[in-house]
Amino acid sequence: MDSVKKTIAGEISLSTNPGASMKKWREIFGITQTQLASHLQITPSTISDYESNRRKSPGIGVVKRFVDALIDLDAKEGGWILKKLSHTEQTDAFELDEFAEPVAAKRIIEAVGGKIITNKRKISVTTVLGYSIVDSLRAILELPVDEFSKIYGPTTNRAVVFTRVATGRSPMVAIRVTKLKPSLVIYHGLEKLDDPVARKISEVEKIPVVVTTMDLDTIRKNLESL
């Protein structure tokens, strides 16, 4: 627990946009401004002011209270987010990372040189908190269905880049049969998405799909810079 607290507090304190970082972590824990304010015994507008940087950057004391509140509220719900953050495992099948602050889906698409295939209208209103790069072949062969959720790390509000895809069907079928859904799916190595099943699932689940042929190392570099 202490290492998770230090990670969150350190990121907020060192961020050039501490308000956005606070908002990101609050959303990762699935806590509303009202819930957080009630726990801290302050007004929701105070939380809003910090997240929008209308108040001066929070000091160490404020950051500590904020982080403790996230952990305490999560514990009341079973501590599931803390468990995910404490036991996030990475294998050769996938890698993941979190952004310092919420990032607009449009910026993600630009960073990967992507072309939007489905659900274009959702792009303008979608922001993500992190990303995963998944070797789709290894994930399908090595990850049991009940462990597929590991590719999401601490939050499903993320972009998932699937590599080594042939038609795009298998990743979307895997998403369809699990409860957890990403905010954005990116197929690496495809110039278009011809598979009707993959398209249909994308539309039903309302998950935008993007294709890209950009070099994977360049994609990693660009995503890390966001």
Image (spheres, rainbow, N blue to C red):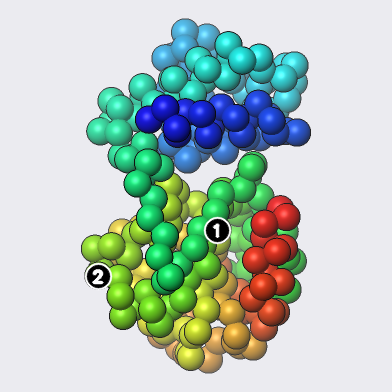
Which residue: 38% across, 55% down?
Answer: 89
Query: Residue 207 location, x and y as percent?
Result: 50, 66
On screen, residue 112 versus residue 153, left or right, reads: right
Residue 19, above or below 144: above
Residue 124, above or below 138: above
Name which residue type carries label 1. Answer: Tyr
Q: Is residue 186 visible?
A: yes
Residues at marks 2 and 1, CA–CA distance in whole angstroms:
21 Å
Residue extending farthest to the top is: 41
Which residue: 30% across, 75% down?
Answer: 142
Residue 105, above or below 10: below
Few, some or many residues within 10 Å of mark 2 (<14, 14–19, 20+): few
Which residue: 57% across, 19% down?
Answer: 63
Query: Residue 220 location, x and y as percent?
Result: 65, 66
Which quadrant: the N terminus?
top left
Q: Is residue 34 visible?
A: no
Residue 111: mark: none
Residue 131: mark: 1
- Secondary structure beneath dot 2 equals loop
Few, some or many residues within 10 Å of mark 1 (<14, 14–19, 20+): many
Comes first in the chain, label 2 or label 1:
1
Which residue: 44% across, 14% down?
Answer: 38
Query: Residue 213 location, x and y as percent?
Result: 67, 83
On screen, residue 113 versus residue 172, left or right, reads: right
Residue 2 vs residue 133, the one in the foreground: 2
Name which residue type carries label 2. Answer: Pro
| Marker count (numbered) | 2
- Secondary structure beneath dot 1 equals strand
Residue 101, above or below 211: above
Residue 144: mark: 2
